[in-house]
Amino acid sequence: IFVDVIARNLAGRPLVGTPEIVANWYMVAIFFLALFGVHVRGGHIRVDLIEICAGQRTRAVLDALTALLFVCGGLALAAYSGTGAYEAFLRGERIELPEFAVPVWPGRWLEPLSFILISLVSLRHLSHQIRLALGGESA
Protein backbone atom coordinates (compact mmCIF):
# COMPACT_ATOMS: atom_id res chain seq x y z
CA ILE A 1 0.00 0.00 0.00
CA PHE A 2 2.87 2.33 0.89
CA VAL A 3 4.57 1.77 -2.47
CA ASP A 4 1.22 2.21 -4.25
CA VAL A 5 0.68 5.60 -2.58
CA ILE A 6 4.22 6.72 -3.43
CA ALA A 7 3.86 5.57 -7.06
CA ARG A 8 0.50 7.29 -7.38
CA ASN A 9 1.73 10.58 -5.94
CA LEU A 10 5.18 10.76 -7.50
CA ALA A 11 4.69 9.04 -10.85
CA GLY A 12 0.94 9.46 -11.24
CA ARG A 13 0.61 5.68 -11.77
CA PRO A 14 -0.66 3.44 -8.99
CA LEU A 15 0.45 -0.17 -8.81
CA VAL A 16 -1.91 -2.48 -10.63
CA GLY A 17 -3.86 -4.82 -8.37
CA THR A 18 -3.14 -3.18 -5.03
CA PRO A 19 -6.80 -2.63 -4.04
CA GLU A 20 -7.70 -6.16 -5.13
CA ILE A 21 -4.85 -7.76 -3.20
CA VAL A 22 -5.56 -5.66 -0.12
CA ALA A 23 -9.31 -6.39 -0.18
CA ASN A 24 -9.02 -10.12 -0.88
CA TRP A 25 -5.88 -11.05 1.04
CA TYR A 26 -4.60 -8.54 3.60
CA MET A 27 -7.92 -7.36 5.01
CA VAL A 28 -9.28 -10.89 5.26
CA ALA A 29 -6.12 -12.04 7.06
CA ILE A 30 -6.08 -9.05 9.39
CA PHE A 31 -9.72 -9.42 10.37
CA PHE A 32 -10.06 -13.17 10.83
CA LEU A 33 -6.65 -13.83 12.36
CA ALA A 34 -7.17 -10.86 14.71
CA LEU A 35 -10.57 -12.31 15.65
CA PHE A 36 -8.78 -15.51 16.64
CA GLY A 37 -6.16 -13.52 18.56
CA VAL A 38 -8.82 -11.65 20.51
CA HIS A 39 -10.48 -14.94 21.40
CA VAL A 40 -7.22 -16.51 22.57
CA ARG A 41 -6.59 -13.57 24.90
CA GLY A 42 -10.20 -13.58 26.17
CA GLY A 43 -10.73 -10.08 24.84
CA HIS A 44 -14.36 -10.46 23.81
CA ILE A 45 -16.91 -8.18 25.41
CA ARG A 46 -18.32 -9.70 28.60
CA VAL A 47 -21.20 -8.74 30.82
CA ASP A 48 -20.44 -10.02 34.29
CA LEU A 49 -23.69 -8.95 35.92
CA ILE A 50 -24.72 -12.46 36.97
CA GLU A 51 -21.20 -13.63 37.69
CA ILE A 52 -20.65 -10.89 40.30
CA CYS A 53 -23.22 -12.53 42.58
CA ALA A 54 -22.44 -16.12 41.66
CA GLY A 55 -20.02 -18.51 43.26
CA GLN A 56 -17.04 -20.14 41.59
CA ARG A 57 -18.96 -23.20 40.43
CA THR A 58 -21.80 -21.12 38.95
CA ARG A 59 -19.27 -18.95 37.12
CA ALA A 60 -17.56 -22.09 35.83
CA VAL A 61 -20.89 -23.50 34.58
CA LEU A 62 -21.74 -20.21 32.84
CA ASP A 63 -18.26 -20.03 31.30
CA ALA A 64 -18.58 -23.66 30.18
CA LEU A 65 -21.91 -22.90 28.48
CA THR A 66 -20.35 -19.89 26.78
CA ALA A 67 -17.40 -21.99 25.62
CA LEU A 68 -19.81 -24.65 24.33
CA LEU A 69 -21.65 -21.97 22.33
CA PHE A 70 -18.33 -20.79 20.90
CA VAL A 71 -17.39 -24.36 19.92
CA CYS A 72 -20.73 -25.02 18.22
CA GLY A 73 -20.93 -21.58 16.60
CA GLY A 74 -17.32 -21.70 15.45
CA LEU A 75 -17.75 -25.14 13.89
CA ALA A 76 -20.98 -24.09 12.17
CA LEU A 77 -19.34 -20.94 10.77
CA ALA A 78 -16.27 -22.96 9.75
CA ALA A 79 -18.47 -25.44 7.87
CA TYR A 80 -20.42 -22.66 6.16
CA SER A 81 -17.40 -20.59 5.18
CA GLY A 82 -15.43 -23.73 4.32
CA THR A 83 -18.09 -24.64 1.78
CA GLY A 84 -17.69 -21.23 0.17
CA ALA A 85 -13.89 -21.53 0.22
CA TYR A 86 -14.07 -24.98 -1.37
CA GLU A 87 -16.37 -23.70 -4.12
CA ALA A 88 -14.00 -20.77 -4.75
CA PHE A 89 -11.14 -23.27 -4.97
CA LEU A 90 -13.01 -25.43 -7.49
CA ARG A 91 -13.78 -22.36 -9.63
CA GLY A 92 -10.21 -21.13 -9.32
CA GLU A 93 -11.63 -17.80 -8.20
CA ARG A 94 -9.49 -14.87 -9.29
CA ILE A 95 -9.75 -11.23 -10.23
CA GLU A 96 -8.76 -10.44 -13.79
CA LEU A 97 -6.64 -7.31 -14.16
CA PRO A 98 -5.29 -5.83 -17.40
CA GLU A 99 -1.78 -7.26 -16.89
CA PHE A 100 -2.43 -10.38 -14.81
CA ALA A 101 -4.94 -12.29 -12.69
CA VAL A 102 -4.92 -12.24 -8.89
CA PRO A 103 -5.98 -15.58 -7.39
CA VAL A 104 -8.26 -14.92 -4.45
CA TRP A 105 -9.43 -18.44 -3.59
CA PRO A 106 -6.53 -19.14 -1.17
CA GLY A 107 -7.54 -16.15 0.95
CA ARG A 108 -11.02 -17.62 1.32
CA TRP A 109 -9.56 -20.41 3.48
CA LEU A 110 -8.48 -17.93 6.19
CA GLU A 111 -12.08 -17.57 7.39
CA PRO A 112 -12.81 -21.26 8.12
CA LEU A 113 -9.28 -21.67 9.49
CA SER A 114 -9.91 -18.87 11.96
CA PHE A 115 -13.23 -20.37 13.07
CA ILE A 116 -11.66 -23.83 13.49
CA LEU A 117 -8.89 -22.35 15.64
CA ILE A 118 -11.47 -20.45 17.71
CA SER A 119 -13.40 -23.70 18.20
CA LEU A 120 -10.27 -25.54 19.33
CA VAL A 121 -9.38 -22.84 21.85
CA SER A 122 -13.00 -22.84 23.07
CA LEU A 123 -12.93 -26.62 23.41
CA ARG A 124 -9.84 -26.34 25.62
CA HIS A 125 -11.54 -23.62 27.67
CA LEU A 126 -14.69 -25.77 27.92
CA SER A 127 -12.75 -28.71 29.37
CA HIS A 128 -11.07 -26.40 31.87
CA GLN A 129 -14.42 -24.90 32.96
CA ILE A 130 -15.99 -28.36 33.31
CA ARG A 131 -13.15 -29.37 35.65
CA LEU A 132 -13.74 -26.17 37.65
CA ALA A 133 -17.49 -26.79 37.82
CA LEU A 134 -16.94 -30.32 39.06
CA GLY A 135 -14.56 -29.04 41.72
CA GLY A 136 -11.50 -30.71 40.22
CA GLU A 137 -9.25 -27.65 40.44
CA SER A 138 -9.28 -24.13 41.76
CA ALA A 139 -9.49 -20.92 39.69
Image (cartoon, rainbow, N blue to C red):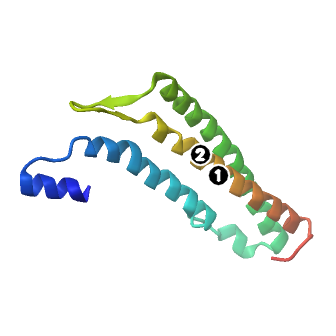
Q: Answer with left or right where residue 61 lies relative to residue 109.
A: right
Q: Which mark is residue 104?
A: none
Circle 1 Cα neighbour tier, 10 Å, few/some/many (<14 / 14–19 / ≥20):
many
> Which amino acid type is marked by label 2?
Leu
Image quadrant in which you'd find residue 96: top left
Q: Which residue is mark 2?
A: 113
Circle 2: element type: helix
Q: CA distance from mark 2 to mark 1?
A: 6 Å
Q: Answer with left or right where residue 123 lies relative to residue 19.
A: right
Q: Which residue is mark 1?
A: 117
Residue 73 at what x, y percent from top left? 65, 44
Residue 90 at what x, y percent from top left? 51, 23
Q: Nearer the viewer, residue 41 or 99?
A: 99
Q: Nearer the viewer, residue 84 or 100?
A: 100
Tell me what residue is drawn at x 64 percent, y 51 percent.
Answer: 117
Decide: is 133 above or below 19.
below
Tell me what residue is drawn at x 65 percent, y 38 percent.
Answer: 76
Tell me what residue is drawn at x 71 percent, y 70 percent.
Answer: 51
Quadrant location of the C terminus? Answer: bottom right
Q: Answer with left or right where residue 33 lies relative to residue 11.
A: right
